[in-house]
Image (spheres, rainbow, N blue to C red):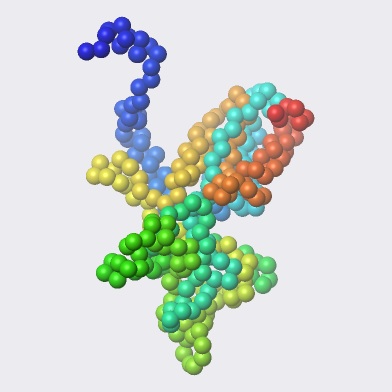
Amino acid sequence: MEDKKLEKLRKKLGYERKSGWESVKGDEVFSFAEAYKEFLSEVKTEREAVHYFVQRAAGLGFSENSSDRISIANRGKNLMLVRKGRKPVADGIRIIASHIDCPRIDLKQVPVYEDNDLAFFHTHYYGGIKKYQWANIPLEIRGTVIDKDGKAVSVRLGQNEGMVFVVPDLCPHLSHKAQDDKKATEVITGENLSLLAASIPEEGKGKDRVKLHLLKLLNEKYGIVEEDLISSELEAVPAMSAMDLGIDRSMIAAYGQDDRICAFTSCEAFFDVEEPEYTAVVFLADKEEIGSEGSTGMNSLFLIRGLYRAARTFGEKLDEGSML
C-alpha cells in the first residue's frame, strides 16, 4: 500500500487523466455530436468547409464589412473570423487555428482515360494517406470546374445520386503472387489509384467509346467538356455519412475528423462568446496536410494582413512591433 504521505503529495502535485464522460452530461455530448455529424456528412472539402462556416457566421451577423464581426474568406479555401474585443488589438488577441484540408485523392488535370473497355479517372494523392486503405471503398467526387467561359461549375457526383466510384483491387484468391509478399506501402501504389468510372460504350465504331460516353454524361449533367477539366479542382472522398460507433454510440466514425473536429468545435466556441475581453480570432487554414505552403496555407500572409485589416476596421493602427 502506498505511503499516505506520498499519496497526499501525489494528489497535491500530480495530474490524473479522467474520461470526459465523467465530467460532462451525456445529453449535452449527444446533442452537440448530432450537429457535428451533420457537418461531417455535408462538408468533405476545404471549399465546402469555408462555405459552411461563412454561412453559419453570416447568420450571426458576420460579414466582410461589419464593424465588429468580420468574416474574410481567402480564395474560397481559407477563412478568418474576427470578433472585436473590449480591449484594443494592440493589447493582444486570442487566436484559435485549425486546418480544414484532409488527406484525399485528387483527379489529375487530364484525368479521363480508357483501358480494357473501362473508363477511369487518373488521380494523385493529397497528404499522407495509406494508399491500400483507399481501394475498394465507395468514393464520391466533389469540387469545381472552370468552363471555357470562365464560369465556376460546382460538381458533386456520388452518394446523393445513389452512385459511387471505386479504386479497384484484386480479390483475395487472385492476389497471392501479386500482393501478399509486398510491404503495405507497395500493395497499392500511387499509379494504381485510378477511379473506375464507367463501362458502357458510346454507340458506333471507333476507339475509346467508353471514355467518350463518360464525357458525354458529364457534358449532359454539367455542360463541361474534357478541356474544361484542365482548370478543375476535383476531389475523391469517402462516400459515407458520419455514423455512431460502438454499441453505446459513444464515438463517431467519419471521414475528415483531422482536423475538422477542431474547426467545428473552435467555431462553435467562438460563436458562443458574447462580449470578448480581447479581440477573438478563428483562423481556418488550407494546405496543412502538405506543409502549409501556398496562398491559402498557414505560411501565407493572409493571417497578418487580415489582422491589420481588422484593426483598421476597429479604428486602430498597428505597427510591426505590436504584431510580434
Would residue 200 appear left or right of 72 to someone viewing this image?
Answer: left
Q: Residue at x 71, y 40 (%)?
A: 305
* Outermost residue toward the top in this view: 5
Q: What residue lies at 59% left-to-right and 33% top-to-bottom?
A: 95
User: Who is closer to the viewer here, 233 or 55?
Assistant: 233
Q: Quadrant of residue 199?
A: bottom left
The answer to whether 319 appears left or right of 56 in the picture is right
Report whether residue 134 is seen: no
Residue 274: where, in percent of width, then height?
55, 29
Q: Is residue 303 visible?
A: yes
- Which residue is at the front of the view, 164 or 149? 164
**Picture coordinates of residue 159 (x, y %)?**
40, 63
Which percent across, then down, holds residue 317? 77, 30
Q: Left of 7 or right of it: where is 55?
A: right
Tell me the quarter of the image containing the C terminus.
top right
- Quick check: 55 above or below 17? below
Q: Is residue 43 above or below residue 318?
A: below
The residue drawn where x is 46% and y is 45% is 258
The spot of residue 116 in percent (x, y) is 43, 81
- In the image, residue 206 sits, relative to residue 101, either above or below, namely below
Q: Residue at x 56, y 50 (%)?
A: 290
Relative to 234, say whether 83 is above or below: above
